[in-house]
Amino acid sequence: MPSASFKDELLAEIRNLRAFAISLSGSVTLADDLVQESLLRAWANSDKFQPGTSLRAWLFTILRNIYYSNYRKRAREVQDSDGFYARRLTVPGDQESHLDLEDFRRALTMLPVEQREVLTLIGASGLSYEEAAEVCEVGIGTIKSRLSRARAKLVEILGLEETSDLPIERKVRRAG
Amino acid sequence: MNVIHANKTEEPEQSAAPDPKAVEAIGRALEAHYADLVKAPLPAKFVELLAQLEAQDRVSDAQGRRDALG
C-alpha cells in the first residue's frame, strides 16, 4: 500500500500533471481523463517509483504513455482548450518583446506534438534535458534538436525574425 | 542517440540560431502560458480519487490482516 506521504506527493503534482496534459492534448476534457487514468496507474504502481528520482518526470512518463496509446486520435477531434485560459493580455516583458499570449497559444498548437511536448517539458515544467529524454524515450541529442526546431518554428510563425532590424536591436534602456 | 539516422524524414538542422531576444520572448510567453494552466481551478475529483484509493487500500489491508489471523 502506498504511503500517506506518497499520496501527498501526488497531490502536490496534480496541477503540473494537468498542465502538461492540456499542453499535450489541447483539450481540457481529455486532459482530465488523462490525469485521472495516470493517478490510478501511479497508485497501482507506486512500488515501481524510485525514491530520490523526480516524481514529476515519472508521472509525466505515465501520462504520456497513456496519451500516445489511447488518446492521440481523439485529441485531433477535440480541441476545447480555447476559452479556458485566464489571461488574454500581452506577456509582460521589456518593450522589445511583447508577445500576445493568444497569438502565442495559437502558434503553440501549430507545432508538431513531439516538438511541443519537449518545449513544454524543458521550458515550462522544469525538467532537465536528461529527465525529458527519459520521459520521451529518446536521446538527449534528439531533445536538443526538437527544442531548437520548436523555437525556430515559433519564431517563424510569430514573425519574430522580421522585427530584428527594428525594435529588437534597439538598446535596452536602463531603468533608474 | 543516433539522431541523424533516426530522423530521416525530418527537416534539416537549422543553419542559423534564432535571435536570442526572440528566444527569450518565447520563453517568457511559454512560462506565462503554463503558469495560467497550473493555477487554473482544479476539479475536486482528483483529490477525491486519491482519498478513495487510500481508503480502499486501508480496508483491504485490514481485511488481509483479519484473514491472516484466521
Image: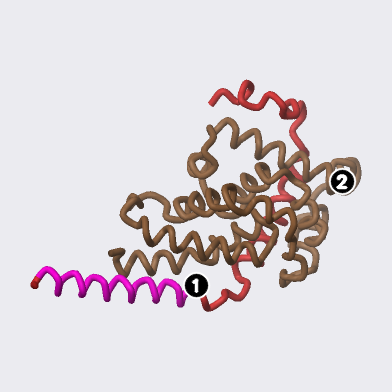
Q: Residues within 10 Å of mark 2 (few under 14, many from 20)?
A: few
Q: Chain of mark 2?
A: A
Q: Amino acid at mark 1?
A: Phe
Q: Is residue B48 magenta?
A: yes
Residue located 78% across and 45% down the image: A154
Q: Chain of mark 1?
A: B
Asked if A4 appears above or below A109 in the picture, the reply is below
Q: Which of the labelled discs sits on residue A159, or is there none?
A: 2
Disc 1 secondary structure class: helix
Residue A98 shows in the view: no
Q: Which of the two residues, A4 or A126, is positioned nearer the viewer here?
A: A4
| Residues at discs 2 and 1 both on one chain | no
> In the rendering, at what x and y percent does residue A51 appear?
32, 53
**Chain identifier for the red-coloured part of the image:** B
Q: Is residue B67 left or right of residue A127?
A: left
Label 2 vs label 1, nearer the camera: 1
